Image (cartoon, rainbow, N blue to C red):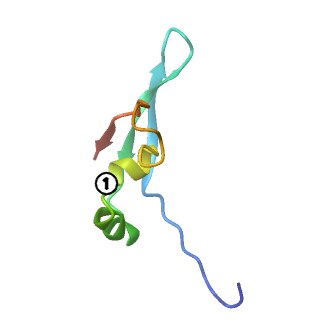
């Protein structure tokens, strides 16, 4: 892209609290105060911010997703 600037900001991060006995990461997603403009459009389409952050909007309905903890 010519003469255009793309600015990125972190909207969420994964906070690791430890490891489970079977070696899996244990933690939660922390949502920052930055709210992307596309969230309003996603809401109009019936997709919540939590769904976007956990990919559950893209996953089959019977797949389990992690709980998003809002900060």
Q: Is residue 48 left or right of residue 10?
A: left
Q: Is residue 51 left or right of residue 13?
A: left
Vertical order, 20 against 48 (above or below): above
Residue at the top extreme of this rendering: 21
Q: Residue sitting at 30 percent across and 40 percent down?
A: 69
Q: Which residue has dot 1 on it?
A: 48
Q: Is residue 19 left or right of residue 34?
A: right
Q: Residue sitting at 57 percent across and 15 percent down?
A: 23
For the N terminus, the image quarter is bottom right
Picture mark count: 1
Mark 1 neighbour density, 10 Å: few (under 14) some (14–19) many (20 or more): some
Residue at the right extreme of this rendering: 2
| Residue 56 at x, y percent in the picture | 42, 43
Vertical order, 45 against 51 (above or below): below
Front-most of 18 and 68?
68
Q: Residue sitting at 34 percent across and 35 percent down?
A: 67
| Residue 3 at x, y percent in the picture | 68, 91
Residue at the front extreme of this rendering: 61
- Label 1 residue SS: loop
Front-most of 52 and 3?
52
| Residue 59 at x, y percent in the picture | 47, 41
**Residue 64: which quarter of the image?**
top left
Vertical order, 25 against 4 (above or below): above
């Amino acid at each position: 892209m010519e003469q255009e600037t793309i600015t990125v900001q972190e909207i969420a991060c994964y906070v690791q609290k430890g490891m489970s006995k079977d070696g899996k990461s244990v933690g939660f997603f922390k949502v920052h105060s930055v709210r992307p403009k596309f969230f309003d459009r996603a809401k109009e389409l019936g997709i919540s911010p939590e769904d976007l952050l956990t990919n559950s909007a893209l996953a089959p309905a019977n797949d389990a997703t992690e709980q998003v903890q809002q900060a």
